[in-house]
């Protein structure tokens, strides 16, 4: 179940999102009540985001921000003696956290100012609200060949069928060679399964991971012994679907 979850959350490159979309997101933030009463934070955010868009290759230094945003005198300003930029950047980071924890929770783009630096990071937000979350189904891995590979292929087909029936277009089918596109809604959850056998029992493991948090929100392990393989695959797929729907707040 080796899948690079970080690729779903990486900071956006300039080519990954239209500048207009970022400016729209900036407008949402600046027009919010949190920033409407915080002029200094609003000015700093506006300056940093616009500079990120207009001069993406240029570094942003504390000295520059002090002069451009807080109108310090270039002849006498010394950042080591005047901490205005550091103080205001800390307040901005906290306000952005409050904004995305509240009114900006469902916004499409997250703007973050890193702790060590002033170049904003832009990341896509993942909508995990019930009825909207997208699920990425990874290929079922077989830890050994033979019967385990055959069982894994059947389980994958059963999972794909049942999940599509219940989730429709919210299901992303991560077949081999699948690549998460730069545009479009990213998945909120990843489903992974593996099958391995020892000649007597085949053990199946299922897990559901929340992409944004990087945490496992559900997992199950089942040993499959003798008996019709199709019936066992159906049982496992039904178990997995019930867990997914329960996580999304949808009746099974």
Image (cartoon, rainbow, N blue to C red):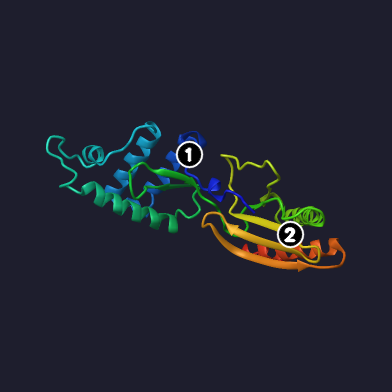
Q: Taking 77 as reference, is 106 left or right? A: right
Q: Is residue 220 visible?
A: yes
Nearer-the-camera pick, 30 or 115: 115
Q: Secondary structure at mark 1?
A: helix
User: Which residue corresponds to the image point at 82% horizontal and 57% vertical from the top-left?
Assistant: 147
Indicate the position of residue 229 as horizontal and vertical percent values. Answer: 84, 62
Residue beneath disc 2: 196
**In the image, residue 172 above or below residue 208:** above
Q: Residues within 10 Å of mark 1 (few under 14, many from 20)?
A: few
Q: Secondary structure at mark 2?
A: strand
Quadrant of the rendered image containing residue 156: bottom right
Evaluate if marks 2 and 1 touch, with contact meaning CB atoms under 8 Å apart: no
User: Which residue corresponds to the image point at 66% horizontal and 42% vertical from the top-left?
Assistant: 178
Nearer-the-camera pick, 238 or 230: 230
User: Which residue corresponds to the image point at 21% horizontal and 38% vertical from the top-left?
Assistant: 67
Quarter holding the C terminus? bottom right
Q: Taking 217 as reference, is 13 left or right? A: left
Q: Is residue 251 visible?
A: no
**In the image, residue 225 above or below residue 4:** below
Say the numbered circle drawn on residue 122. Answer: none
Residue beneath disc 1: 21
Indicate the position of residue 96 as horizontal and vertical percent values. Answer: 38, 53
- Whichever of callouts 2 and 1 sits on the residue coming sooner in the sequence is 1
Q: Taking 98 as reference, is 73 left or right? A: left
> Residue furthest toward the left?
76
Indicate the position of residue 61 as horizontal and vertical percent values. Answer: 27, 39
């Amino acid at each position: 179940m080796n899948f690079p979850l970080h690729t779903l959350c990486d900071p956006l490159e300039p080519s990954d999102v239209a500048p207009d979309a970022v400016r729209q997101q900036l407008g949402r933030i600046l027009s919010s009540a949190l920033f409407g009463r915080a002029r200094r934070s609003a000015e700093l955010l506006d300056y940093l985001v616009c500079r990120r868009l207009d001069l993406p290759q240029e570094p942003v230094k504390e000295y520059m921000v002090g002069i451009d945003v807080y109108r310090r005198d270039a002849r006498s300003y010394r950042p080591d003696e005047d901490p205005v930029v550091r103080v205001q950047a800390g307040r901005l980071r906290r306000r952005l956290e409050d904004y995305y924890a509240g009114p900006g929770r469902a916004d499409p783009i997250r703007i973050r100012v890193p702790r060590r630096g002033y170049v904003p990071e832009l990341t896509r937000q993942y909508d995990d609200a019930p009825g909207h979350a997208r699920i990425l189904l990874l290929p079922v891995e077989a830890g050994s060949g033979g019967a385990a590979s055959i069982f894994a292929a059947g389980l994958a087909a059963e999972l794909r069928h049942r999940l599509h029936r219940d989730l429709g277009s919210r299901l992303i089918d991560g077949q081999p060679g699948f690549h998460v596109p730069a545009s479009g809604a990213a998945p909120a959850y990843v489903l992974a399964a593996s099958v391995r056998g020892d000649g007597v029992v085949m053990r199946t493991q299922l897990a559901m991971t929340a992409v944004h948090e990087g945490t496992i929100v559900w997992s199950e392990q089942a040993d499959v012994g003798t008996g019709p393989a199709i019936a066992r695959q159906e049982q496992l797929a039904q178990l997995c679907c019930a867990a997914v729907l329960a996580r999304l707040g949808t009746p099974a």
